[in-house]
Image (cartoon, rainbow, N blue to C red):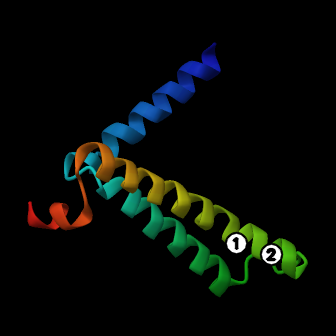
């Protein structure tokens, strides 16, 4: 029970601190993509996972960015379908 409350508190903290959806609704998925690909690029340039075999290294470095990008595209398409929100309308605000 205590762990659930801690996780709930962590979630609320993230929502309160990074209120990017208050700026525009499409900003959180775009920001998530940019940040995760930046971290992947940092992993490549710093030589992270050098001890792992090449296939495992690629999986470690590209697995999360590809997954987050797919989920972000899904979220952006959902926002466009259900609410008519696009990046183009976000830039006009």
Which image quarter is the C terminus in? bottom left
Front position in the image: 49 or 79: 79
Separation of disc 1 and disc 2 at Cα? 6 Å
Query: Relative to residue 70, is residue 78 drawn left or right?
Result: left
Q: Residue at x 82, y 81 (%)?
A: 50
Q: Position of residue 57 (x, y in %)?
A: 80, 75
Front position in the image: 20 or 74: 74
Please state the total of marks drawn on the protein image: 2
Please give the label number shown on residue 43: none
Q: Are marks 1 and 2 in contact (CB under 8 Å)?
A: yes
| Residue where numbered disc 1 is placed | 61
**Pointer 2: residues within 10 angstroms few (<14), some, or many (20+)?**
some
Which image quarter is the N terminus in? top right
Residue 24 vertical position relative to residue 39 in the rendered view, above or below: above
Front position in the image: 60 or 91: 91
Query: Relative to residue 39, is residue 76 drawn left or right?
Result: left
Q: Residue at x 72, y 83 (%)?
A: 47
The picture quadrant where one finds residue 68 is: bottom right
Please, what secondary structure does the residue beneath circle 1 have? helix
Q: Residue at x 86, y 81 (%)?
A: 54
| Residue where numbered disc 2 is placed | 57
- Name the residue at the front extreme: 81
Residue 53 vertical position relative to residue 81 in the rendered view, above or below: below
Q: Residue at x 30, y 55 (%)?
A: 26
């Amino acid at each position: 029970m205590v762990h659930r409350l801690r996780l709930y508190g962590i979630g609320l903290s993230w929502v309160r601190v990074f209120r990017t959806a208050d700026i525009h609704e499409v900003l959180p998925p775009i920001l998530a993509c940019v940040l995760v690909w930046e971290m992947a690029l940092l992993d490549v340039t710093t030589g992270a996972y050098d001890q792992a075999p090449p296939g495992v290294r690629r999986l470690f470095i590209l697995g999360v960015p590809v997954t987050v990008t797919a989920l972000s595209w899904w979220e952006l398409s959902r926002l466009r379908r259900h609410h008519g929100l696009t990046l183009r309308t976000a830039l006009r605000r």
